[in-house]
Amino acid sequence: MTDLAKVAVLGFGTMGRGIAQVVAASGRDVTVLETTQELVDHGQVKLDQFLAEGVRRGKTSEDERAAIRGRVTGATDVAALAGHDLVIEAVVEDRDVKAELLTRVAEVVGPDAVLATNTSALSVTDLAAIVPASERFAGLHFFNPAPLMPVVEVVTALQSSAEVITRLEAFCNDIGKDPVVVPDRPGFLVNRLLMPYLNDVVQAYDDGLATAEDIDTALELGLGYRMGPLEMLDMIGLDVHHHATRSAYEQLLDRRFAPPPLLDRMVDAGYLGDKTGRGFRAGGGIEPDTTSNGGAA
Amino acid sequence: MSDSARTVGVVGAGTMGTGITVVAARAGFTTIVHDVDAAGLERGLDTVRGFLARSAEKGKLTHEQAEAAQANVHGTTDLAELKAAGIVVEAVHEDLATKQELFGRLDDIVATDALLHTNTSTLPVTAIAAGSRHPERVVGTHYCNPAPLMKLVEVACGRHTATDAYERTLRFLDGVDKVTVTTKDRPGFIVNRFLIPWENDVIAALASGLGTVESIDRAVVGALGHPMGPFQLLDIVGLDVHKEVAMRLYEQFRDPRFAPPPLVDQMIAAGDLGRKTGRGFYTYDDDRLFGS
């Protein structure tokens, strides 16, 4: 028998959509909750586009596409979540919004349902404290794009029971993901390591160490990274990284997590990376002085 | 084209020196590799010969190409034989005084327009250049290991490096099929500048219980697409080598993020240096009584 067979995803944004697709691909029925029918429809259209692209590239068969599509149902009423075994919350990164929604959802699904949050920046332990029977609460941190990224961080809140963590690990394996169990600390594991590195690169770039392209080329060719750090920042979105690293900084008070001034300014200017067509690499970057040979100051 | 423009000198027949010798000889340069130690030179020449032979066996080079490259290679223990070189690449051990003294001696041997390249990874190019009476011809060219296979060379000018020397250097490296990036003369240039604090942070995360060796490697490879996990890489590099590079950067930047975490000292004290000792973050010897 399949554990956690009936799954609900809260939020039909980029992450919610990706998670719904992955879960549906494992044969489970997925209900995706949004606030309006418009947002449900928008999510379905985006899901269709992603699946169509998968078919076009030969990553997904036509049958798989149709099956996944058939298992994902939209909803705008929390009452539709009654009887679900697992709820994965993936709404906006706002503590109060998540808290209010999780409270309502917990009432509907009952005390036996497992509740998980896809937050990357908030305290899982704090969110767990909001719901009754906090021991069934944990983090399930998917990476973007969820259908393509193999790893999921299973985040253990202080209250999470060992049984729930074991079930979520098994669930991840069952949906084709590689679970990594991590404690609930700011940034968990991957972002905890990634953020200071990205901030360090931004500061060194601002200090004129090398051009954006040369920094990326050096790390791609020198270390075999699939993508250089500045291209990665453009892809993630400078605002997204800014929000995450600032949140970690506020919790850790460790200056390595503080957004470097150039990052602040680029967000101020609306240079958010690929999505706005301008970032460190996107749109020709911000054109620093590259005429110097790197020698005399 | 003059002979000097087609002749490269390499000083130091260790891992990097022999790799750079292959790079230059394979690209058609007459390449004279020097080592102070006759036995070390012979080992280095054997390494070059072995690499070129394997390249031919694997079909990376034709037999003719491998033979032509081999014919370009000459060894010497007499520094004066580098007289004909238009470029001398130093790849001696990472010691400032040794490199400075070498460049001072080369001033008396090579032509005035010959370039002096240093393959230093962690020392200031400017400080090495100060050993030459012509610091304007000194350029940092940091190759990655193994040099014949890795495309990247980090190019760094010292404070007095001439623009012409920099531009000739880029042309040379382009001619030996390398991809160059230009960086300021800062400790660790680009790759080590970002790798060392990253590795230190990963070690600190392990020490503070954020994950296990295995889970951290799995998370980094899966989530960030790195070709191997940070602990696998550290075991290959060697904990002792990591500490040495980290300490050099720490001493220059005076920033604690470059300082190796205490776990590194502990592992070195225990002799767990990585693959070369059979145990580092992972254990490589199944015969041990206690697995890690």
Image: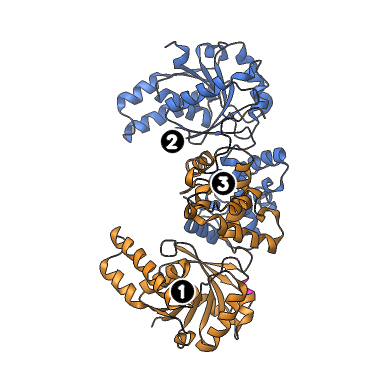
Chain colours: A orange, B blue
Q: Tell me the distance, in whole angstroms, between the alpha carbons under discs 3 and 2.
A: 25 Å
What subunit carries mark 3? B
Residue A186 against residue A206 in the figure, above or below: below
Along the line of sight, the residue nearer the viewer: A240 or B113: A240
Provide the residue designation for mark 3.
B277
Identify the residue at horizontal 36%, vertical 29% (top origin): B53
- Kind of residue indicated by mark 2: Leu
Provide the residue designation for mark 1.
A170
What subunit carries mark 1? A
From the image, state whether disc 3 or disc 1 is nearer to you: 1
What subunit carries mark 2? B
Q: What stretch is highlighted in magenta?
A: A119-125
Q: Tell me the distance, in whole angstroms, between the alpha carbons under discs 2 and 1.
A: 41 Å
At mark 3, the secondary structure is: helix
Provide the residue designation for mark 2.
B149
Residue sitting farthest toward the left: A62
The image shows residue A292 at horizontal and vertical percentages of: 59, 30
Residue B13 against residue B223 in the figure, above or below: above
Q: In this view, does B123 lie to the left or right of B224?
A: right
Q: Is residue A71 left or right of residue B10?
A: left
- Kind of residue indicated by mark 1: Ala
